[in-house]
Amino acid sequence: MHEVSIANHIYKIVLNELEKQEKFPKLQKIKLKIGKLSAVVPDALDFAWNAIVKGTNLENSILEIEEIPVILKCHDCKSEFNIEYPVFLCENCGSNNTELMSGDELDIVSLIIDE
Amino acid sequence: MAEIKIVKKVLAANDAIADMNKKYFDEKKILTINIMSSPGSGKTMLLEKTIIKLKDKYKIGVIEGDVSTTNDAERLQKLGVEVIQINTDAFGGDCHLEAEWIKDAYEQLNDTDLDILFVENVGNLVCPAEFKTGTDFNVVVLSTTEGEDKPVKYPLMFRVSQIMIINKIDLLPHLDIDKNKMEDNAKRINSEIQIFSLSAKTEEGLDQFIDWLIKQIKK
């Protein structure tokens, strides 16, 4: 549901970035990294993006979303592992002394433009 | 084709304002509490009962977030505390509050010299978890009728919250829910989350939460 807000935040950042260019370029693609722990649904974000850019000079640009797995590190047994299910305990020793290494990203990585 | 590297958090602007809010409220020594939950979990009644217990000794303000209507704000205003309503339908019906709106709403208060500022976020277990507000504590309210697996279904909400309140414990005799399992599920998502079990309606267990709140007051 909040994908419209997220898309708006992306729009502001991208517009600001493109306005820094000498000549406003034609935007092809935005590369994003979205962690699986973040509450963003890629399809909904895609839908929101298309709605927001319609009629603007970012129209027809697309989002390329790389989903980032949730990786935990255990500070007790030092193992690092990928979790599919939201249990933040060490799958090796059961410790709760774990740290999230990745999976909460909501980042813009780069913009692909026509030269 | 060319690639412009940016590497920027999408919500960097919101995070920056949240950090400013936190710094500002720290300087003013205002305890700030962001209350989040699904709709109907009893956030507003919990706030009503909490305010009644604290308002004679402490100066309290409330920022009330709803998609539309001022019903909740009116309930709280009756208690004699100042309430600023944010209706997000003006912002496109958003399901959460953003840090900037918190700042703007706070600035609308006639009396900003508070002991406690409560933020009642929009009822939703997904979206508010993604947007920092700059409050001292995120409190997630989960009522017993919602089932024990909500933490597993909405892990981000339970990761970003420091406090979990299990509300409506007066209904437990009528439900099949296993409250211990609900607590376990939350602890498996966030081992440091502190849990209070209470009934805002009967006030059973409410005093433990009130005592905890009073200990956090900065003045």
Image (cartoon, helix red, strand yellow):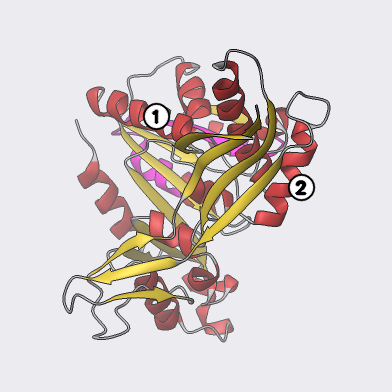
- Tell me which residue sits at (64%, 35%) in the image: B1
Chain letter behind tag 1: B
In the rendering, at what x and y percent does residue A10 appear? 59, 35
Camera-side residue of B59 and A99: A99
Q: Would you say residue B23 sits in the magenta stretch? A: no
Q: Would you say residue B71 sits in the magenta stretch? A: yes
Chain part drawn in magenta: B48-74
In the rendering, at what x and y percent does residue B174 appear? 58, 83
In the rendering, at what x and y percent does residue A68 appear? 49, 61
Q: Are marks 1 and 2 in contact (CB under 8 Å)?
A: no
Left or right relative to B165: residue A30: right
Q: Is residue A37 above or below residue B65?
A: below
**Displayed quadrant of residue B188:** bottom left
Q: Amino acid at mark 1?
A: Ala
Determine whether the residue tagged by mark 2 lies in a helix, strand or loop.
Answer: helix
Find residue A47 and name its label.
Answer: 2
Can you identify the residue that label 1 sits on? B16
- Tell me which residue sits at (26%, 22%) in the image: B28
Chain letter behind tag 2: A
Camera-side residue of B101 and A33: A33
Q: Amino acid at mark 2?
A: Phe
Q: Is residue A64 above or below residue B118?
A: below
In the rendering, at what x and y percent does residue B136 appear? 31, 41
